[in-house]
Image: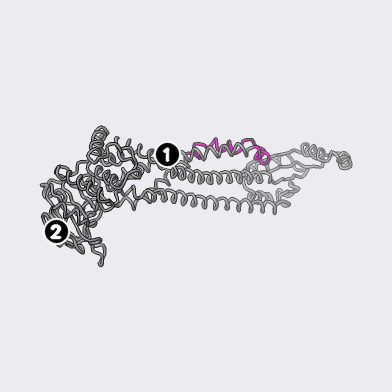
Amino acid sequence: MYFRKYDIIITPMIHLKNVSKKYSRDSVGVENINLKIEAGEFVFVVGQSGTGKTTLVKLLIAEERPSEGEIEIGGWNITNIHQDDIPFLRRQIGVIFQDFKLLPKKTVYENVAFALQVSGHPTARIRESVPKVLDIVGLKNKGDRYPHQLSGGEQQRVVIARSLVHRPKILVADEPTGNLDTVNTQEIMEILKKINEFGTTILLVTHNREIVNQMRRRVVTIHDGKLISDEHEGRYRL
Amino acid sequence: MLSLLRIIRFAFQDIGRNIGLSFMTVLILVLMLLSVNTLLIVNLLTNRSISSIKNQINVSIYFTPDATDKNIDEIKKFVKSFPEVVEIIFKNRDEVLAEFKQTHADNPEVLASVEELSENPLGATMVVKTREPGDYAKIIKALNVPEYENLIEAKSFGDTETAIERVKNVTTQVERFVAVLSAVFIIIAFLIIFNTIRASIYTQRIEISIKKLVGASNWFVRGPYIVESLFFSALSVVIAYGLVLLFSGIVDPYMHVVFSETGILTNYFKSNIIVFAGLQFAAVFALTIVSSALAMRKHLRA
């Protein structure tokens, strides 16, 4: 297991204890969040725009530090993670963004391979893993295309491939279907479901009522930065 | 080692895929280096002009015909003892007379009156050159002592004192102007490089943040920029120096007319190639590294 930065038992996969993020006195990202996500779970985080969902994602990948509380990822307390350790954390969490965040001057293959190159994986392993993961997301024949030559749905599949290629235990997706039409949304959700079935813990931030109600998974609702409900097999209730 | 090879590969991949930006960066660096080399040319030509003017200034000391060789030797030794003195040209009485006759060869009346005299009426002459025009006053003052009063007939300095003073002032002003110009050029060069690199990093800020989000360490993000800086610095110095040598070859024949010296600029740049090209490369590379580190600092924090 990758997360054993320190000798701690790895469960739960994500653990937030009384976490608050305050940007200023008047601007609160999240407030007093308590959340425990076990390995292999598929959890939706729902809420209206500006309620703190993205802040939560940023806290999980150490793009932001909590003002109060503690965060543990796979048993690794990242509350006050050192700047030098952030790359190690990010190499172990797959992250999917609404705006894709692909490197525009790199091909599909190179974008996916980059996630392995940064952590010093040998070239032979990269040559073996990248085509496999591109096959999983249905882009095996588009490895030499540049992001601008792909549709939105295809770009998002590249992002999924990139986030999967280093076999993360956690996949965090921030509005992954926000820029996609219904057909592409369904395809992406199918891929994510499959990934979850292979044992990857998924935390998916969305305000897409349809996909939440269709999947019938655990739903955590955030409103005004506070966690107001946490239901197993929940529905979108806002 | 694997990471280093990947960093080098990414750097050249970035250069190729951002060819427009790479071209503009090299172009600006070349233009900046050309300005610096222009300054070197201005400096060289100014120094040559100043030393040429200084060379034309000297003080002639005319001895009386009664001055003995012993007296003259003593004065010669005395003048030579000044560290400011760089050259003494001595002409004995016969040489002075011969020169006089040659100068007035087309004036038979003057020559006839000299011939009428049984003895050479002219005394020996000593031409003194000092390092700086300002040093002449010191020499003249030292010779204005009672024991030399009957031995020295005249000193030409009195007539040229104002001119020497003016040359001294002009050369000092020119030297100051060139120094200020150099300082201004260096500041402009620094600002150009800093802003070029900052603009280049700014256009790639999103890519930098994506690389960080995917788990790249700061060195993995910075590495290709360092390699690019190294490449851009070397390429721009080679291009700029090549252009300077080409320009020197073209203008050298014109310089020859003014300074009576062949290949003045070409020789100057060729003989100093290691120092000039080396320093310019080191300065550009250091500036690009510092500029990119400063410009990137903000984007690497996330």
* Position of B105 relative to A222 (above/below): above
Q: Nearer the viewer, residue B102 or A54?
A: A54
Looking at this rendering, what residue extends furthest in the front direction?
A183
Does A169 appear in magenta? no
Q: Position of residue B55 (x, y in %)?
A: 66, 43
Where is the N terminus of chain A found, in terms of image quarters?
A: top left
Residue appearing at x 17%, y 49% in the figure: A202
The amino acid beneath tag 2 is Asn
In the figure, residue B11 lies in which quadrant?
A: top left
What's the CA distance linking mark 1 and mark 2?
52 Å
Q: Is residue B151 left or right of residue A178?
A: right
Residue appearing at x 37%, y 42% in the figure: B226
Q: Is residue A107 left or right of residue A12?
A: right
In the figure, residue A56 lies in which quadrant?
A: bottom left
Q: Where is residue A153 in the image (x, y as percent from the top left)?
A: 28, 47
Mark 1 on the same chain as mark 2: no
The label on residue B170 is none
Callout 1: residue from which chain? B
The label on residue B231 is 1
* Position of B65 relative to A71 (above/below): above
Does B271 appear in magenta? yes
Callout 2: residue from which chain? A
The part of the chain drawn in magenta is B253-277
Q: Position of residue A75 (x, y in %)?
A: 14, 49
Q: Where is residue B279 in the image (x, y as percent from the top left)?
A: 47, 41
The amino acid beneath tag 1 is Phe
Label the magenta part by its dominant secondary structure.
Answer: helix
Q: Is residue B172 left or right of residue A14?
A: right
Residue behind mark 2: A34
Q: Rate crowding at label 1 as few (under 14), some (14 to 19) or many (20 or more) other CA atoms within 10 Å.
A: some
Residue appearing at x 29%, y 49% in the figure: A100
